[in-house]
Image (cartoon, rainbow, N blue to C red):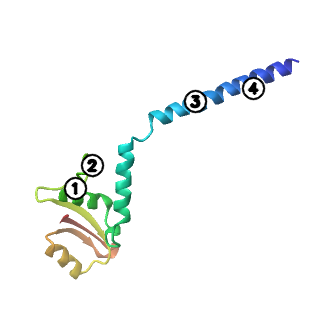
Amino acid sequence: MSWLKSRHSNFSRATALVGMLVFGTVGFAQENAVHPEGLRQMGFLMQEKAARTPAQRKISSNLLHTLRLQQGSFTRNLPNFRTGVKLDDQGKTVVDIRGEVSDEVLHRIQALGGTVINALENYGHIRAAMTL
């Protein structure tokens, strides 16, 4: 009968452990649940991303969001939203552009008011300071 006692006490310990995990997890989930306002804001960002054009899908979300913040189109739906994109005094930020490096592309960057920092033709990479 000693084996029955040990099985019973092991069962009790296991039951207690499962109970702590289950009920502890419920408390943890309640404490860390996403606030309804956060869910609304995430939904807004998901809708914005789904509505992008094919050309916009190639651009960093942070750059697009910074542009929309500048335009004021995010302020109502995302009043405290920050992207971390640093702009200089002229409103320019450093961007990396992947693709064919050609005189035409470099001239287009300059025509748009950008400054080419470097261009690596062999790697298909351009770093430029651009206004959004």
The local secondary structure at tag 3 comes to helix
Which one is earlier in the sequence, the residue at label 4 or at label 2? 4
User: Identity of the amino acid at label 1?
Assistant: Leu
What is the spatial separation of the Cα atoms under label 3 and label 2, in whole angstroms? Answer: 35 Å
- Total tally of numbered discs in the picture: 4
User: Identity of the amino acid at label 3?
Assistant: Phe
Q: Are marks 4 and 2 in contact (CB under 8 Å)?
A: no
The residue under label 2 is 81
* Residue 64: quarter of image: bottom left
Q: Are marks 1 and 2 in contact (CB under 8 Å)?
A: yes
What is the spatial separation of the Cα atoms under label 1 and label 4, in whole angstroms? Answer: 58 Å
Q: How dense is the environment of label 2, judged by Cα within 10 Å: few (below 14), some, or many (20 and up)?
A: few
Residue 67 in the image, given as x and y percentages of width and height: 22, 60
The one of 17 and 29 positioned closer to us in this rendering: 29
The one of 79 and 120 positioned closer to us in this rendering: 79
Q: How dense is the environment of label 1, judged by Cα within 10 Å: few (below 14), some, or many (20 and up)?
A: some
Q: How dense is the environment of label 3, judged by Cα within 10 Å: few (below 14), some, or many (20 and up)?
A: few
User: Identity of the amino acid at label 2?
Assistant: Phe
Which one is earlier in the sequence, the residue at label 1 or at label 4? 4
The residue under label 1 is 69
The residue under label 3 is 23
The residue under label 4 is 11
What is the spatial separation of the Cα atoms under label 3 and label 4, in whole angstroms? Answer: 18 Å
* Residue 110: quarter of image: bottom left
Which one is earlier in the sequence, the residue at label 3 or at label 2? 3
Q: Quadrant of the N terminus?
A: top right
Which one is earlier in the sequence, the residue at label 1 or at label 3? 3
What is the spatial separation of the Cα atoms under label 1 and label 3, in whole angstroms? Answer: 42 Å
Residue 71 in the image, given as x and y percentages of width and height: 18, 59
